[in-house]
Amino acid sequence: MEVAHIMGAKVRDVMTPGPIGVDYYQTIGETARTMRDWGVGAVLVVHDQMLYGLVTDRDLVVRAVAEASGPDGPVGPVSSANVIGVDVDAEVYEAGRLMRENHVRRLPVIEDGQVTGVVTLGDVAMEHDHASALAAISLAVTDRALVSVDEAEATRLVRERAVRRIPVLADGAAVGIVHLGDLAPAATAAWPDC
């Protein structure tokens, strides 16, 4: 199996597909419960069937709770509007550059004018240096730290966890990342768009 590196890796290879979205007028409390139920720290905010912004769990604390907005207030006003997106076929390096230049940690991923995923600073870190502290934290927080001993085990984990990449651990340290495309065709059957 080949371990991918940041040069040439595409955003589609590292993003989380199927982003969670909420309506602009959905309440702050409902949005917090959505984040909890889906196990995510950010959701996209949609207004009039268009992407309006993104709201994080931190936004809910700093912009809503700290400002005494109740849980029944709309989430739209506490979200970050005018988000920067990245094309699904852009290189991971480009996503990192956009994050750095715009001082953001998450980017919606755009394909054919539609949001198809979210790429995070942790995703970029894992692709760039899977042994870095940020990559290790991202692995722990997102429960993507999957140990793979061989291709058969990696294939089983891809199907079981429905993930596109598997950080490979040896002696408790990240030593590489196996992408779905690196696996046998039997593994990729779970993801027809690969």
Image (cartoon, grey):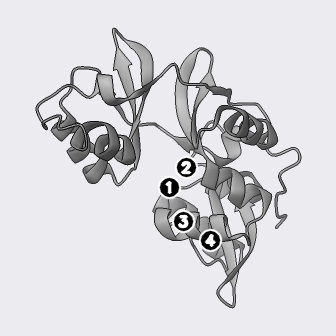
Tell me where residue 155 appears, x and y as whole percent. Answer: 62, 66
Asked if the residue at tag 1 contacts the one at tag 4, i.e. Cβ–Cβ closer than 8 Å, the answer is no
Q: Is residue 79 left or right of 142 when viewed as pictured?
A: left
Could you say which quadrant of the image residue 183 lies in? bottom right
In this view, 159 is above or below 32: below
Tell me where residue 69 appears, x and y as whole percent. Answer: 17, 34
Say which label, 2 or 1, has the lower sequence index.
Answer: 1
Q: Which of marks 2 and 1 is in front?
A: 1
Q: Residue at x 81, y 42 (%)?
A: 93
List the residue tagged with mark 2: 190
List the residue tagged with mark 4: 136
Say which label, 2 or 3, has the lower sequence index.
Answer: 3
Marker disc for residue 162:
1
**Circle 1: element type:** loop
Tell me where residue 58 appears, x and y as whole percent. Answer: 38, 47
Compare residues 53 and 140 and report the one nearer the observer: 53
Tell me where residue 81 appears, x and y as whole percent. Answer: 45, 21
In this view, 158 is above or below 33: below
Instruction: Tell me the distance, in whole angstroms, between the alpha carbons under discs 2 and 1.
Output: 8 Å
Q: Which of marks 2 and 4 is in front?
A: 4
Amino acid carrying label 3: it is Arg
**Circle 2: element type:** loop
Q: Nearer the viewer, mark 4 or mark 1?
A: 4
List the residue tagged with mark 3: 144
